[in-house]
Amino acid sequence: MGQYWKLVNVDKSEKIPQRGAKMVEVLGFRDAKVVLSLLTVPNLKNGLAPERELRRTRVYNFYCRLVKLPQQVFDAIVAEISDPISILSLALTCSYFWRVLLPQVRAAICTIQAPWAGDRLVFVGDYASGVP
């Protein structure tokens, strides 16, 4: 009779929802795909546009009312947005914002696609008490 295990993210006090699995089942079979999907940071090298085209895209998107805002006002608006989906939504409104928000877009995509990347993980057996 074996012990059942849970994978716990120590930094976020979360556990991967499982049906109750032995460590061999988690590491050796389909449950490992769940773990890998949380840890794999997407390759963004070819997927995001270069920032060097910023000036050209500002002229191209000048008729967008948000592009006409002074940069300080736009920066203040962006500073208030913490939700990665909202950052991506704003970035997708026009190509100028996509390039201005490129660092935030990269961070948002990584947050959405790899929420546990870089966090401390631990396997905890079902005999342990006090686990989040």
Image (cartoon, helix red, strand yellow):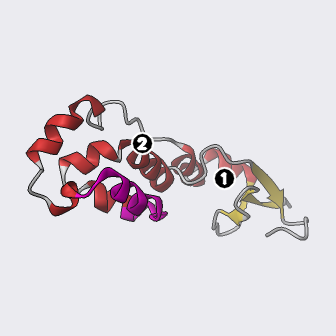
Q: Residue at x 42, y 60 (%)?
A: 76
Q: Is residue 11 left or right of residue 68?
A: right
Queried whether the magenta region covers residue 104, the answer comes back as no
| 1 or 2: mark nearer the eye | 2
> Badge 2 is on which residue?
103
Q: Residues within 10 Å of mark 1 (few under 14, many from 20)?
A: many
Q: Picture quarter containing residue 88?
A: bottom left
Element carrying mark 2 = helix
- Looking at the magenta stretch, what is its main secondary structure? helix
Q: Position of residue 119 (x, y in %)?
A: 68, 48
> Badge 1 is on which residue?
26
Q: Picture quarter containing residue 7?
A: bottom right
User: Which image quadrant: the C terminus?
Assistant: bottom right
**Nearest the camera: 81 or 65?**
65
The residues tagged by marks 1 and 2 sit, at their Cα atoms, a distance apart of 35 Å
Q: Is residue 73 left or right of residue 62?
A: right
User: Which image quadrant: the N terminus?
Assistant: bottom right
Q: Which mark is residue 56?
A: none
Q: Position of residue 95 (x, y in %)?
A: 19, 47
Q: Residues within 10 Å of mark 2 (few under 14, many from 20)?
A: few
Queried whether the magenta region covers residue 79, the answer comes back as yes
Q: Residue at x 35, y 47 (%)?
A: 101
**Nearest the camera: 36 or 18?**
36
Circle 2: residue type: Pro
Q: Residue at x 13, y 59 (%)?
A: 64
Picture layout, residue 56 above or below residue 109: above
Q: Position of residue 113 (x, y in %)?
A: 46, 52
Earlier residue among tags 1 and 2: 1
Magenta-highlighted residues: 69-86
Picture layout, residue 51 above or below residue 82: above
